Image: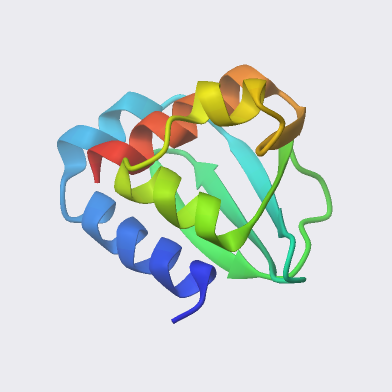
Amino acid sequence: MSVMEHMAEMVGKLKANPGILDSVSGMNKTFQFDLEDGEKFYLRVENGDISVMDGVATSAAATILASPALILDLMSGKADAIKSFMSGKLKVKGDIFAAQKITDLMKRA
């Protein structure tokens, strides 16, 4: 299963719990994921809804660069985003604070 498929599964869990989505109700941002294995997808948060799309977003608030294994570990809570960022394993270009909010949201799913 690809990282995007795992992300889509997680988004399904988030949508099943409206209380969690309330925390991003005012956020309208797109997050590009560029993985070291070449996989590219983006996460769009818009008007309290969240979706995952294959490919490259036309404009993204933040681009997240990492290995597939690290993204999976971040999604499952096995890795810490701050420590991964500080060690250089996770790179974020753009709005790092919004990217942190998405990481926290993933852990809650």
Instruction: Estimate the x, y position of residue 55 in percent, counting from the top left.
Output: 73, 70
Residue 10 position in % (x across, y down): 32, 58
- Name the one closer to the observer, 24 or 83: 83
Residue at 16% in and 34% down: 19
* Residue at the spot 17% in from the left edge and 55% down from the top edge: 16
Residue at x 62% of width, y 36% of height: 29
- Image: 33 above or below 80: below
For this rendering, which residue is in front, 88 or 74?
88
Q: Which percent across, then down, holds residue 97? A: 59, 17
- The quadrant in which residue 7 appears is bottom left
Q: Is residue 103 above or below residue 50?
A: above
Residue 107 in the figure: left or right of residue 90? left
- Position of residue 59 relative to residue 13, above or below, is above
Q: Residue farthest to the right?
A: 58
Q: Residue 87: percent from the left, percent from the top?
A: 66, 26
Looking at the rendering, which quadrant does residue 39 occupy?
bottom right
